[in-house]
Amino acid sequence: MLTHKMRTLFLKLCEYVFPERDEHRIVRNLRPDDLLLHLCPITRGDIVSLLPFNEPVVRAVVHEAKFQHNEKAWELLGEVLKQYLKHCGKNTLLIPIPLSEKRRRARKYNQVEEITKCAHKLLPHLEISTDTLFRKRDTVPQTTLSRKDRLKNITGAFGVRDVASIKNHNVIVIDDVSTTGATLTVAKQALDKHHPTSITLLSLAR
């Protein structure tokens, strides 16, 4: 049986061999109120963005949510999303931006979907759909492209199934980060054809 001293030495050795990522440490020590201090919705064009990505704390949470399967990061961003959505009424449908099947298989999760589910648990009167909007084809990651090429890359990439689910609903399409807004804009074009009551485009960070 390990003594307290032995256990402490073992943990220190683990930290030396496997140093903690800086962004993981930031998220581990972060409370929801710390992140909510940065909540500042800004509307640019058709897109509402909630958090400034250039803030180190925001960037750390987004990176951990997106690339590291960090469930606390999902919950923290879910709390931010809840704060923005809490005044929405019934007939509000939350639609997270989907990944392509190829990228989802590689990553094994869709961080936007997980964050939206966290918010939905706190706001169960809202509806959520993770399969109404889907990717018809795989696309090159937007972050690898110039602003000029992003819209061309994503145009025509989304399809809509279960059309009845969006009729008579105020649809909110959610993405994690919006730079040019191309992904959300093209998603709106796909949904618009089926005449929901309204469509709001929302990114967690800008």
Image (cartoon, rainbow, N blue to C red):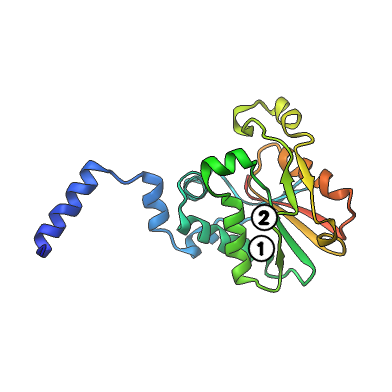
- Per the image, label 2 sits on a secondary structure element best described as loop
- Does residue 143 lie above or below 201 as drawn? above
**Would you name the residue on which mark 2 appears?**
41
Nearer mark to the viewer, of 2 and 1? 1
Q: Is residue 68 visible?
A: yes
Residue 29 as seen in the image, left or right of residue 99: left
Q: Which residue is depicted at the point 89% across and 48% down? A: 193
Q: Are marks 2 and 1 in contact (CB under 8 Å)?
A: yes
Front residue (pair 80, 145): 145
Front residue (pair 51, 21): 21
First reached walking from the N terminus: tag 2 or tag 1: 2
Specify the quadrant of the image occupied by residue 39.
Answer: bottom right
Q: Which residue is depicted at the point 71% across and 36% down? A: 137
Q: Which residue is depicted at the point 41% across and 46% down? A: 23
Q: Position of residue 159 (x, y in %)?
A: 78, 44
**Would you name the residue on which mark 1 appears?**
84
